[in-house]
Image (spheres, coloured by chain):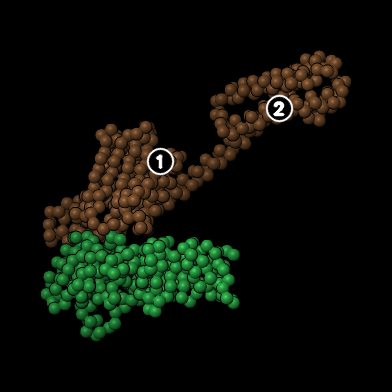
Chain colours: A brown, B green
Amino acid sequence: MADHAALLYTYDLPFRAALTDSIISNILLLGICLLVINTIRYYVPKKDQFMNIIIMCLVLTVIWLLISRWLLSITLDQYEGYERLLLHSVVIRFSIAFLIVGITTAIAIIWYTFQEQQRTEKREAEMERLNKEAELFKIRQQLQPHFLFNSLNSINALIALRPDEARKMVQQLSDFLRGTIRKEENQFISFQEEIDYLKLYLEIEKVRFGYRLTTELNIAEETLNWRLPALLAQPLMENAIKFGLYGTRGEVLIQMKAVIEKEHLAVTIINPFDPDMQMPPGMGFGLKSVQRRLYLLFGRNDLIEIQKTSGEFIVVFRIPYTHE
Amino acid sequence: MSKVIIIDDEPLARSIVKEYLQKHPQLELAAECNDGFEGVKAIQQHQPDLIFLDIQMPKINGFEMLELIEQPPAVIFTTAFDEYAIKAFEAHAIDYLLKPFDQLRFNKAIAKWEEKREAATPSKTEDLLETASLSPSQSQRIVVKNGSKIKIIPVHDIFYLEAADDYVKIHTAEGYFLKNKTMAHFEEALDKLQFVRSHRSYIINIHQITRIDPYEKDNHVAILRTGVKVPVSRSGYGKLKLVLGL
């Protein structure tokens, strides 16, 4: 700014006029630069868009030139010869301004690209950490000691009472365990596969809990081909069953609905609950880990929703359409 | 003849115990119960000599059920997997059956119980319950008997606790409930950042305090949201200041 003023001063312009010109031009230029920085902050250009960026800088510089010329000619028209000076200096003004806007843009792009990169790296690092955690959790869940030993105990009782049912349950339990082992974290499967797996699990639980547990699945036909990450619906269902069975007395109805809604697969799981009871330990963790996984896979926090009414605990999760 | 009761929420888990009991004609099955609520009733009604008790059950677990019974009968716990419970059993040398178990293991448990009964070894159930009640799930709620009804009090609903002879009065919005425990027990079991022993006979839920006023010399009194005044001793005042960050 001082340079600018000094330069004009040497062109025989009165000091006051030189200073005003300098202030107006530079404040305007600062405004333009801030505009550029703010734009790039929210919208980092991709590699193949450099032509657009250069054009944007040119356009902004021209706009700056026009506005500053207009403002300067209004404020400084009492000085003799100023109009001429303004005309003569158009090229140099334009060049310097273009240079400044260009450099600012370049720095902003580098800075924000760098920041974005850091964010991505951080997200990836966290994804890796969570994957490890999920894997550990999965290993523990795979073993599912409580579920496994209780199922074996039921089979033990059935062997004496109803041997055919015992044999059927051994088969179901084996298929279920094989399913848990086979599935990779973050692997996408069809909703049909997840439902089949879920049904296997429900059959076993129904043998264990007898008349107390009833389930109602309401799955729309068009959802069955939807792709979703493996092992999302089943853990939520397991949560709902545990919460329902251990949080209330008497018969427990677990409902599940699946529909396609605004290009998302929307799955609702409802279990009865007593507002006075605390969530059983582990349940909060199950919900949170599903929420985290959805965030890491889709970068969104709004894919799982929990509602509590006076007697119902409702979990809704949504899966956007993917090509995977 | 000795009377036996089975308490388990899984029907097949009860039927396996029934099956194994057939080899022990000296034991008579008096009742089968789906959960702790039925268990409390059946124990009062039948006064059994022995119960088979599951841990994880609807609303109240096996330990909480036992707490509600004045003089609990001998217990053989049956559980699938519960690290915390197993630690508690081992610490107090109480017999337990890990599901699934076979007839042989079952017979051993019965033999052990009969041996203990003849030697009249005092039951260690109370020590066991003391340990079990410190488990994470149980420190979130207190189960009490209110007449013939069973009431589950989430700890955040408690206003304050007051010593009353052999009992502790648990004051809540619905009035107070009595629990046959000591103040020292609750001081240990409840979250120390939320419940402060303000006085020899009082434990306060700090979220209920609206102000603390001086009272006579050296003493203070805590005023709760409901307007109730709870005594605060000198050392209690120090503890409150620490927790409240004053």
Q: Is residue B72 left or right of residue B103?
A: right
Residue at image coords 29%, 51%: A272
Q: Where is residue A54 in the image (x, y as percent from the top left)?
A: 62, 23
Dot 2: what SS? helix
Residue at image coords 50%, 43%: A123
Residue B41 appears anywhere in the view: yes
Give above or below for B18 relative to A194.
below
Decide: few, some or many residues near mark 2? Use Cα within 10 Å; few <14, some 14-19, many ≥20. Answer: many
Q: Are marks 1 and 2 on the same chain?
A: yes
Residue nearest the viewer, comparing B43 with B131:
B43
Tell me the subunit letter for badge 1.
A
Q: Where is residue B225 in the image (x, y as percent from the top left)?
A: 48, 62
Residue that carries the numbered disc 2 in the rendered image: A29
Q: Where is residue A117 in the image (x, y as percent from the top left)?
A: 55, 39
Q: Nearer the N terminus, badge 1 or badge 2?
A: 2
Q: Position of residue A281 (x, y in %)?
A: 37, 58
Q: Do the residues labelled 1 and 2 touch (CB within 8 Å)?
A: no
Residue that carries the numbered disc 1 in the rendered image: A303
